[in-house]
Every structure is written in C-alpha cells, then in structure tokens.
Image: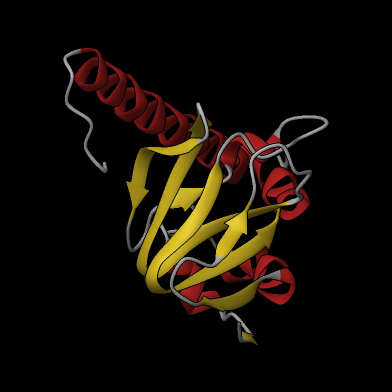
C-alpha cells in the first residue's frame, strides 16, 4: 500500500471539487493523500470509526455488508466515485466494508477538510453542500435499486 501527495489539479478532477478556487483547494490538497490498494485489500471496515472521505482514482471498490456470515455487495464504485460521505456526520463509523477489486488507487481527504469547505459560507460552501447532497442521493438511489433487485432474487455487483 503506497501513499503519495495530492495536487490541486488532482482534486479539481473530482466532482466535489470541480471549479473551486485554488486558494480554497490548496489546504485540502495539502491534507489529502493518495493510497494504492492491492486486490481484496480493505480500505474501511463496517463499524470502524473513520475520519476520511475517499475518491476512487483507478480500479474498483466494492461496498458490502455482512449477512448471515457472507458479504453482500451493495455497490461497486469506479474512477471518480466518492465513498465515505456518511463519515461527515457526527460520531462517524463506516456503514459498509470497502474493499478493492483488483489493484486500486484512492485519494483520501480528512472529513474535517470537506466540512470546512461545506461550512465556509458563500458560493463555495453552498456548491459543496449541494454536491454532497447529490452524492448521497445517488448512492441512496443505487442502494434502493440494489435492494429491489435483491427482492426479485437477482443480486448484482453494482
């Protein structure tokens, strides 16, 4: 598992940060870290406390829940997808287990940095809040669709 620096340009390529001013992204980039994951390596385990939000830069990450002793995939994320938005809440714990499917690379950002942007006021704060709500809504919709497929007897990987 390798770690490396993250640039403002790296962040600008991610939906949440697209179009934000350099001076507002620089502190986020300074706190962010790039992380490489091996196949099946766990990024976050359900129930663990965590303080970072991540974006998939390459590869795929599955989000799963344990049911009757087996992992049930509820979503598969790919390049550009955000995971861990639920960690922005108070007393945050991971809601799912996030695991690499093959080699993967993520950018991790401390949740506090994302919250600072969201609560900064002005146009930037409003835009970040709207984008976070949109990410949560997309994930909830995908989870709802997954549950509907499961109730029909079909389980897919995302």
Judge by depth and name the residue closer to the eye, 105 or 157. 157
Residue 104 position (above or below residue 17): below
Pinpoint residue 129: horizontal percent, then vertical percent: 56, 34
Residue 41 position (above or below residue 6): above
Residue 17 in view, yes or no: no
Residue 5 falls in image quadrant: bottom right
On-image quarter of the C terminus: top left
Residue 100 position (above or below residue 45): below
Count of marks, rendered view: 0
Judge by depth and name the residue closer to the eye, 117 or 32. 32
Pinpoint residue 127: horizontal percent, then vertical percent: 50, 40
On-image quarter of the N terminus: bottom right
Instruction: Say left or right for 77 vs 123.
Output: left
Pinpoint residue 113: horizontal percent, then vertical percent: 73, 54
Instruction: Say left or right for 62 vs 118.
Output: left
Residue 106 position (above or below residue 46): below
Q: Image point 66% across, 40% down: which residue?
A: 94
Q: Image point 24% across, 15% down: which residue?
A: 148
Residue 137 in view, yes or no: yes
């Amino acid at each position: 598992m390798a770690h490396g620096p993250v640039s403002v340009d790296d962040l600008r390529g991610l939906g949440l940060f697209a179009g934000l001013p350099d001076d507002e992204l620089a502190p986020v980039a300074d706190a962010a870290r790039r992380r490489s994951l091996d196949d099946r390596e766990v990024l976050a385990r359900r129930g663990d406390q965590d303080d970072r939000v991540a974006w998939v830069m390459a590869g795929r990450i599955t989000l799963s829940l344990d049911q009757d002793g087996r992992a049930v995939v509820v979503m598969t994320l790919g390049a550009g997808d955000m995971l861990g938005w639920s960690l922005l809440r108070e007393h945050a714990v991971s809601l799912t287990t996030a695991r690499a499917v093959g080699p993967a690379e993520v950018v991790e950002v401390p949740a506090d940095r994302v919250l600072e942007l969201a609560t900064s006021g002005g146009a930037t704060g409003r835009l970040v809040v709207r984008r976070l709500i949109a990410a949560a809504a997309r994930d909830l919709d995908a989870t709802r669709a997954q549950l509907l497929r499961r109730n029909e007897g079909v389980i897919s990987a995302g």
